[in-house]
Image: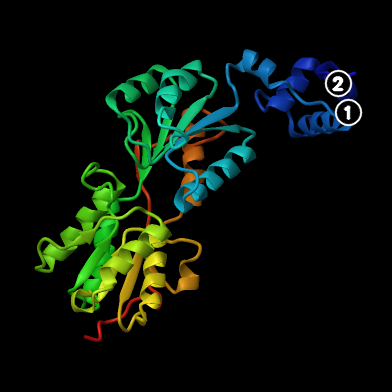
Amino acid sequence: MVPSIADVARLSGVSKATASRALSGRGSVSPATRDRVVAAAAEIGYIASPNAASLVTGRTKSIGVIIRFVNRWYFGQVLEGLERALLERGYDLVLYNLAVAPDARERIFGYYLQRRRVDAIIGVDVDLSPEESDRLSRTGRPVVAIGGTMLPAAVRLAVDHRATARLATQHLLHLGHREIVLLGGEEAEQDREGVQGSRVQGFRDAMSAAGIDDAPYLPTEYSMSAGFSAALQLLGDPSHRPTAVFAACDEIAFGTYIAARRLGLSIPADLSIIGIDGHDNAEMFGLTTIAQDPVAQGEQAVRLAMSLLGEGDAEPAPHDIDLPVRLVVRSSTSAPTR
């Protein structure tokens, strides 16, 4: 026989209403009573029905996460932070991966989110069309955005990618480099206000301020293999080889590092390399990088979602939050030798 809430109440010596409040975390119950009820539930193996709880509270105890990729380092780290923080609060994570199939966006915004089976929505680097924004708004769910452009009313936390790229470029310029090439920005022209476009513009800001206009960049995908291929193309001709490469993400930087070594170049004597992200493997490569903390970003997004839902003692959520970055100098950058 499956244990019921009445069994828990009888074993712990309280009413069914008190047992329900103690297990749901809603309502006033003394710590001693809550501990007694939880112990009784564990003893008989009682598990509360999420569907029944949803009927009473109007909550699903689930958060929808819309994400562009799941197989890239940054997005995987954000997911880790989201999942960790949600599990701590007893919430499920419902994942909507926009990269699954070409028609995934239409199904997600036109059908899945309209069923309202989540209490709030967190977007990770998602840029919405006006129609998608309208559909998301009609769900009536609180929205938190990590980067990207979601809804005007969404709580948004983001890195200033333009300023971050400017800082990376300035580091190379301060070391004395003038022949600097940016690797990245494959989608920069189509999305000038997004991550890739902003990083290209930040690079050009710094170069222009140093008196170098129309600084070159080589468009490439944000991956190690793409960085490797682009770097072989860039560095293969010794007569046009730069003294420094600014890789638009650390994974491109790793590919550049491997390509440079394949060509017999010494780092940083022949080539300085700087990246962005603070990847787990950056220290292994000795990579100078502008580091961010995507796990902490995921955890912070959950705290903001809880605040919008009025959960516990969560602080009121501000509308926009600037995420911190820091320059981490390692052995991949130095003054040019030529």
Q: Which residue lies furthest to the top in this view?
A: 55
Estimate how packed mark 1 is, as few (under 14), some (14 to 19) or many (20 or more) residues with alpha carbons within 10 Å. Answer: some
Q: Earlier in the sequence, mark 1 or mark 2?
A: 2
Mark 2 and mark 1 in contact (Cβ < 8 Å)?
A: yes
Estimate how packed mark 2 is, as few (under 14), some (14 to 19) or many (20 or more) residues with alpha carbons within 10 Å. Answer: few
Answer yes or no: is residue 131 visible: yes
Q: Is residue 116 above or below residue 99?
A: above
Q: In this view, does 223 lie above or below 121?
A: below
Name the residue rendered at 35%, 45% in the picture. Answer: 158
Task: Say whether residue 198 is left or right of residue 293.
Answer: left
Q: Residue 310 location, x and y as percent? A: 51, 28
> Which one is nearer the viewer's eye here, 166 or 103?
103
Q: In this view, does 45 lie above or below 7?
A: below
Answer yes or no: is residue 276 visible: no
**Number of callouts:** 2
Query: Which quadrant would residue 84 be assigned to in this image?
Result: top right
> Which one is nearer the viewer's eye here, 41 or 238?
238
Q: The disc labelled 2 sits on which kind of residue?
A: Pro
Q: Is mark 1 on a helix, strand or loop?
A: helix
Name the residue rendered at 46%, 72% in the picture. Answer: 285
* Res 3 label: 2
Q: Is mark 2 on a helix, strand or loop?
A: loop
Q: In which quarter of the image is the C terminus?
A: bottom left
Query: Which quadrant would residue 156 be assigned to in this image?
Result: top left
Q: Residue 47 location, x and y as percent? A: 78, 26
Residue marked by disc 1 = 44
Q: Residue 181 location, x and y as percent? A: 23, 66
CA–CA distance in space, label 1 to label 2: 7 Å
Q: The disc labelled 1 sits on which kind of residue?
A: Ile
